[in-house]
Image (cartoon, rainbow, N blue to C red):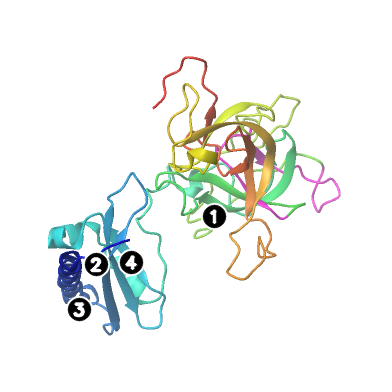
Amino acid sequence: MMMFDPNAVKAKKKQQAQIRASCARIQGWVEDMIPEIFKDEAKVPACSVKVREVQCGDPACAPIDTVVELWFEEHPAKGFGIPAKSEEVTQDDLLAEMPEFPVLRMWGRGEDPEWPAPDPPPCRPSELKLAQGTQVEIRVGDGSWQRGQIVDNWYRDRIWPKWVWVPYWVKLEESGLFTYSPIDSAKRIRPAKVDATSPGGDGAPAKRPRVEEGQGGGGGGEVGEAAESGGGEYHFDDEEYQAAWRFAVGDRVLCFIGEEVEQVGEGQGEELPRPVGCPKGWAPGTVDTLNVPDYPEPSEGDEEGGGESPLYLAPYLVELDPPHNRLTVVPRDWDECIRPFPEAGGPSE
């Protein structure tokens, strides 16, 4: 039977009062910044500021974060976190974690810029071999070539690390799915062959298209030189192209599943045993399928997948070894997501 402890109740109330006071102090700092942030705007938008402490379940971050939420008029809330208790937060900490003022101004107008801002792409879109809108053939994971159209040059997803870009984001013609070429190489992507029955077509390879200023993902002028020699045309032959993905069906791999603890029989709450050479947060498995449709998260109340079309083709579906005993989708063919299975005796992290 649990005994009532008035001292513990008193201490808890005191702690809660201290948190409220610290959050109110931070809220005041943010509210004082609002007029300065929007000094160049026609008007200062009404902004409601809320500050609170939250527990972070990620073992890689601070156990307590201070979260600042900004509610601009009728727009959805935006916010950011500071990895510290509210009583520990200084004005310098606030400024260090706060988005840049241009981002805040865009939030105030209801826009949704990517933040933290990604690194710039490796080069201008005009320096790539193929322009936005080009009809192409792209090598997919089963080794076949599929027709499609480039819908974006230098594409990235917000969930990717801020330095990661892919040169081509392609909509496949037959399935309507989206996929990407991770490199600007004819071994992965090439212009579609011209149909001899098309206007002006004679079965010759497609020439490098031109792109006007403001098109092709921001590039301007003529988009570079053709990748292959011979009159500015791509030449197709019987060359053996490399596989699109690093792993094949049946390959043994390690998959990143996060710093998770799974519930397994009597060992509930305990970390699962890992084979030699398997870092923490990773699990061994076998590649089951290539080119898996990666569906969007269902909305609340919707059935799984929400009835929407797949977003793109994920490279791998992997069957994890016991005790996980489940299939997992590997969204990207990166070392951060999937690695070769280590040789016996390899060190674990």
Which residue is located at x 24 percent, y 67 percent? 4
Amino acid, disc 3: Pro
- Name which of mark 1 and mark 2 comes first in the sequence: 2
- Name which of mark 3 and mark 4 comes first in the sequence: 3
Find numbered disc 2 in the image and state the secondary structure of the residue it sits on: loop
Q: Quadrant of the C terminus?
A: top left
Q: Which residues are magenta?
A: 176-202
- Neighbour tally class for label 2: few under 14, some 14-19, many 20 plus, Cα within 10 Å: few
Question: Main structural element of the magenta stretch: helix, strand or loop?
Answer: loop
Which residue is located at x 16 percent, y 60 percent? 89
Find numbered disc 4 in the image and state the secondary structure of the residue it sits on: strand
Disc 1 marks which residue?
216
Tell me how far mark 1 sits from mark 3, CA to CA. Answer: 38 Å
Disc 2 marks which residue?
4
Amino acid, disc 4: Gly
Is 325 placed left or right of 2 in the picture? right
Q: Quadrant of the N terminus?
A: bottom left
Which residue is located at x 18 percent, y 69 percent? 6
Disc 3 marks which residue?
35
Q: Nearer the viewer, mark 3 or mark 4?
A: 4
Give the answer, above or below, for where 38 lies relative to 331. below
